[in-house]
Image: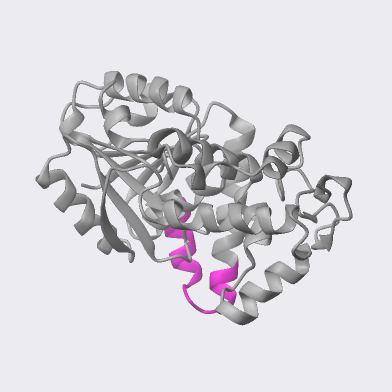
Amino acid sequence: MKNIAVIGSGTMGNGICHVFAQNGFKVAMIDISQDALNRALSTIDKNLDRMVKKEAITEADKSATLANITPYTQLAEGVKNADLVIEAATENSEIKLKLFRDIDAAAKPEAILATNTSSISITKIAAVTKRPDKVIGMHFMNPVPVMKLVEVISGYKTSKEVLDTILTMSKTIGKVPVPVNDYAGFVANRILMPMINEAIITLHEGVSGVEEIDTVMKLGMAHPMGPLQLADFIGLDVCLFIMKVLYDDLGKDKYAPDPLLVNMVNAGNLGVKSGEGFYSWTHGTKELVVSSAFKK
């Protein structure tokens, strides 16, 4: 397997492209927007520059990595030669299901189709294709070039051969793959998102403030980042979506998203991506937000 297609050039998509290209794979980076592709290539270039400065790679390595990436705005053209297609689009069920119908129609029959979803059922995605045995989850962590973990999620009909292929390939690109079964939230988000939601409940109930909650978790639990700051980085809309998936699929009250999270998303306070969440990010640095939204 030498040819990889990645659909979506956002934070996760460009990170996945970076990692595969740096490890010698030919990568088709696909997005409907040429501007988005240009921004992604610029991001990869800057990230490679940082690696050169740290002497982690050479200038020749950087040039070779960039040469391995070809941008496409047409999905069918980008996936036609791929041995593995990785979808890294918005975490939205309808968008992903439509994409997989299109990918299935355009990709060669033997190609493996993977999704970077962090919560949506692999079995449900696979069911809209004619190759459910070749559909699998590859949940990379952000930032992809740095984080070692890949959750490898088998759907109900994913073959053992495809699972073994993806586990081996993940190791080839320097990742540590962990096989996971197809249940809501998988492992990472089934544990992480309720913790973030509980931190929001703790804030909403007035137990403590934003910085105080994050400080407790950083200093007391050795987390590199507090749960509220992490929520800002993930995107509060993504956190809410995943909590709804957990609540709908598992049917337990402990997965109900806190009303403060719902209100913040409805107000457009999505975290880093919007410039304001639990912190303000509008000036490029983290500042505490004083907002009436935190009141009961």
Where residue 3 sits in the image (x, y, percent)?
28, 43
Q: Residue at x 21, y 27 (%)?
A: 108
Determine if residue 81 is in view: no
Segment tinted magenta in the rendering: 50-66
Where residue 169 sits in the image (x, y, percent)?
24, 56
Closer to the camera in the image, 261 or 225: 261
The quadrant holding residue 105 is top left
Left or right of 189, for residue 135: left
Closer to the camera in the image, 273 or 290: 290
Closer to the camera in the image, 168 or 33: 168
Residue 48, relative to residue 126: is it above or below? below
Q: Is residue 107 magenta?
A: no
Q: Residue at x 76, y 66 (%)?
A: 208
Q: Residue at x 45, y 33 (%)?
A: 248
Where residue 148 sits in the image (x, y, percent)?
39, 66
Determine if residue 112 is in view: yes
The quadrant holding residue 218 is bottom right
Residue 39, relative to residue 210: is it above or below? above
Q: Is residue 51 magenta?
A: yes
Left or right of 7, for residue 50: right
Where residue 219 sits in the image (x, y, percent)?
64, 81
Left or right of 1, for residue 187: right
